[in-house]
Amino acid sequence: MSILVVGSVGLDDIKTPFGEVENQLGGSAVHFSVAASILADVKMVGVVGEDFPQEHIRYLERKHIDLEGLEVVKGKTFRWKGYYEYDMNQAHTVKTELNVFQNFKPKVPERYRKSDIIFLANIDPELQLNVLKQMYHPKIVVADTMNFWIESKKNALIEVIKKVDIMLMNDGEARQLMNTPNLIRAAHKLLNLGVKTVVIKKGEHGAVMVNKESIFIVPAFPLEELRDPTGAGDSFAGGMVSFLSKNKNITDAVFRKAVVYGTIIASFTVQDFGTTALDSVSYADIKNRYKKLSQFTSFKNI
Amino acid sequence: MSILVVGSVGLDDIKTPFGEVENQLGGSAVHFSVAASILADVKMVGVVGEDFPQEHIRYLERKHIDLEGLEVVKGKTFRWKGYYEYDMNQAHTVKTELNVFQNFKPKVPERYRKSDIIFLANIDPELQLNVLKQMYHPKIVVADTMNFWIESKKNALIEVIKKVDIMLMNDGEARQLMNTPNLIRAAHKLLNLGVKTVVIKKGEHGAVMVNKESIFIVPAFPLEELRDPTGAGDSFAGGMVSFLSKNKNITDAVFRKAVVYGTIIASFTVQDFGTTALDSVSYADIKNRYKKLSQFTSFKNI
């Protein structure tokens, strides 16, 4: 199945206890696409300014990411500057410059409109709804969000949740939106809004998938060293969605594999800045780590 | 294998968003013993004051908990008063009255000294070392601790860790003691001190077992309602240790089952105040939840 992503493309300045980078290629659409590109070709809708380096364009093209939907407009590219403390759990924003992203009105090229799977990365839920209107019958709609939209555009976000098949959120956001500290209850309240499957990302604690029939819980791949957690959530989504795209019949077993596959992809991503670590990952590396995670989590019946 | 526990026996006043109790039977040795009593008989070493209600004695005796080592001395029983906020992750202490526990010098009755498994619940590490000296060749020594001892008696605690087979800690304590935010690295640093197996309790995120050969990660059993998390960690330990006691040969597979069994026992414990929920749990209930957790966590290879 063909994949379309709509999200941010930006340049990040990131500092962690393990190093510092400037003008690092980033943004939700980038992290998603690069992660997905290991298994599938992705069509991207986004916007950058005239200052966006050609080398980044070439980098994305080498990954077979379709950039027809990436507008280049007058002005500067979206920029984020942030740092992580020693514990790496929390991103601290120093500066966000929306720049050309401020007036981003996603235009889905005609050729993209019949994509089978669409990933609405973390953008204004009103824009997410607008993108959905431009699509012809996508088979699977996946959306992500963030606390900013929960606080500022809750009603539009609820509309998005009602319309998508898979809602991705992190644990804090799910608790906040559904107004309960209990994650399982938050997931069930999200299901009651009409979404078919909820996937809650818990950072170092892994992910939980909940639908009406099933609960699936997987820990993060245990790592002794991570260098930069930026983009881990979108990388997870890219892994998960690309895995789903390779299966006609999305059974519970396939969905579980996709969640684990996303978990493994994200575990590579955080081992270097930006998407760098994914450039040298082979499918054999992924399978190897996937198998290890299975060993780390399996137990026999009593 | 026979089990000995040394720890606190107390009376708790607990308030949670789901209710309030006074003079609830509590303490680490109690939570451990009651949890373990479903599978095994436990010998207890502890201390209470003259005010300790006879009904609690009878309750523990009904669970076949051997109380020869429970001293009754002049003065008042250890008391803890605390509450939990809506999110239930953090216990807030209102008042701790050590009372007779202040001068607790555990005396292991002769008949107890050849116990096969000993659980050194969270008490002063110097007392834990002293108890170990009183034992004849226990086969498995398990210890727990808390941040208070990490801050005030770090050296004695390190001595304990060097001498035990299984060290139980919660995630925050492991990070604090080993001075790293990375849990897997903290576990490996603990192993380097000489302990054979580390079991890290992560509350609502489950538990991780690490030894030189293996990592095992299990989530908490997903619950939509919990009423009182007090004693969950000791209940987990009681479940795990009692399961181990039923196996002569502690293989990796047996250890994993024991960790899951402890996880399931703790999931029942938190559904009511004190040890109340465990009074009505059958082995069939436990097996049923155990099997469900297996379904919640299993995935196939890609």
Image (spheres, coloured by chain):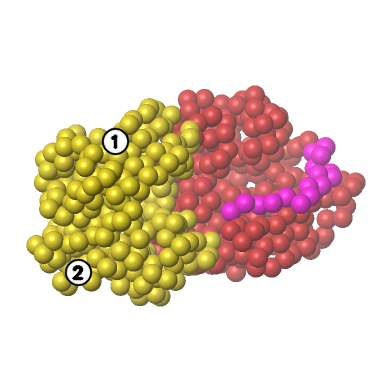
Chain colours: A red, B yellow
Q: For the N terminus of chain B, give its image quadrant.
A: bottom left
Q: Chain of mark 1?
A: B
Residue A202 belongs to the span the image colors magenta: no
Q: Which residue bears the numbered disc 1? A: B24
Give the amino acid at mark 1: Gln
- In-front residue for pair A4/A160: A160
Determine whether, in the image, residue B235 is placed left or right of residue B245: right
Image side of residue A98 versus residue B122, left or right = right
Label disc, if present, on residue A14 of the rendered structure: none
In the figure, is residue B150 to the left or right of A55? left
Asked whether A162 or B40 is in front, the reply is B40
Chain letter behind tag 2: B
For the C terminus of chain B, the quadrant is bottom left
Q: Position of residue A30 (x, y in %)?
A: 68, 52
Q: Quadrant of residue A216 in the image?
A: top left
Given the current orientation, which residue lies at the most extreme right position?
A: A74
Residue A196: x percent and y percent?
A: 48, 32
Work out how far the residue at label 1 is from the one at label 2, CA to CA, in angstroms.
31 Å
Q: Position of residue A159 (x, y in %)?
A: 61, 25
Question: What residue does disc 2 label?
Answer: B134
Task: Check the image and report above or below for B211 versus A233.
Answer: below
- Work out which residue is located at the far left of the displayed protein and give it: B111
Q: What's drawn in magenta, residue-wise?
A: A89-104
Q: Is residue B45 left or right of residue B145?
A: left
| Any part of residue A265 in sight | yes
Residue at the spot 69% in from the left edge and 28% down from the top edge = A153
| Residue in the picture at 16% in, 37% down | B54
- Name which residue lies at 21% across and 42% down: B50
Q: Relative to the observer, which residue lies in front, B138 or B149?
A: B149
